[in-house]
Structures are given as structure tokens and as C-alpha cells.
Amino acid sequence: MKYLVFLVAYAALAQQPAARILVAYHSETGHTEKLAQAIAKGAASVEGAEVTLRKTSDVKPEEIARYDGMVVGTPVHWANLTAETKRFLDQVGAALWAAKTNGDGRTAGAFCTGGGTAMGKDVARLSVLAAFLTMRFTVIGGVDSEGYGTLGPEATTGPADPGVSEKEQEEPRRFGERFARLTRQVRRQ
């Protein structure tokens, strides 16, 4: 009987249209872009997920309301998100308002890169997530290699730990998979 219930639930999920996910990022050095690519790769590996990877400056306001989930990435500037990332979040809110909708039934996540180990990466991600919570999105966090919850992927890219290594791309890839799976479950019917 349990097997039959599973098959019915699986068949219903398989018949749903693809979950549309936007991975948007602002990147000046390419580090945040590398995390965005890893997240998009992980999300695209989930059956039933349609992933779009774009710079925040390339996302058109008229396309925002079509996404079931959004993951936004930013480098850290002065212990917070960048002005460009803030402008993008303002654009998301305005586009949803114009479409007479909000984040209900949609998911959101955040990721960032910063030069030092404690240079505001938590504050930057919290700022992104606070904006999404205000718009009524369901926030999805990450899971680190030890199984603990996180605010989303991050990488330290300063002189002591330059660039984004293959190992540092594993957490964002896993996050992308988790984000896509949960977005398929949460999204509007």
C-alpha cells in the first residue's frame, strides 16, 4: 500500500510543469559568478527544474513574475550586499507589485562571496533573505558539509584564500539541488 501511495504521489509530481528557477547574481571579479554557476548546475540536475542563470543587470522586470524560485548572489561591500543587488531586489518587489502578486508560493535563497572569513557575509545574505521574506517568499537555506543549516552558500575570496576552489563549489551545487527539489514542492499549483 505504501508503494502505491508513493507511485501516485510521484506520478502527480512528474505531471507538473517544470519549476522555473532564476539564479541571479552580481559579480565584479567572477567569484560570485562561479558560485552562481555551481548553484545553477545543481538545480538543473533535478528533474522537473528549468533553470535560468543571469546577471542581475540582465534580468528584465517583465520576466520576474514567471519564476517559481529565485536565488540571488552578491559580493560583500562594506559588510553588506552591493548597491546593484539592492536595486535588483527593489526591481523584484516592483515587478511583483505591478503583476498584482507577491512571493506566496515562491521560494528564495541567497549566496555571497567576501574577502575575509567574517567580512559581513552573514549580513549580506540576511539582507537578501529579509527582502524576500518581506515579499512573502518561502526562504530555503543551505546545508553545510557537516549537515548543519546555513543562510546559503558562501566563499571567502581574499588574499588568504584567493578564488573559488572546486571544493568551495560543492556546497553551492548541493544547495542548487536542494533548492530545486524544495521549489518543486512549494511552488504555486
Image: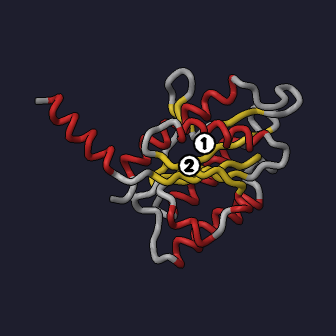
Q: Residue 182 at what x, y percent from top left?
A: 42, 43
Q: Residue 4 carries which label?
A: none
Query: Label 1 amino acid?
Result: Ala
Quick one: 152 or 42, which is closer to the camera? Answer: 42
Quick one: 108 or 183, which is closer to the camera? Answer: 183
Q: Quadrant of residue 152?
A: top right
Residue on which disc 2 sits: 51
Q: Who's the residue at 57% across and 40% down the image? A: 151
Q: Residue 163 at what x, y percent from top left?
A: 82, 31
Helix, strand or loop status at disc 2: strand
Quadrant, the C terminus: bottom left
Residue on which disc 1 sits: 40
Q: In which quarter of the image is residue 175?
A: top right
Quadrant, the N terminus: top left
Q: Which residue lies furthest to the right in this view?
A: 159
Q: Who's the residue at 41% across and 62% down the image? A: 104
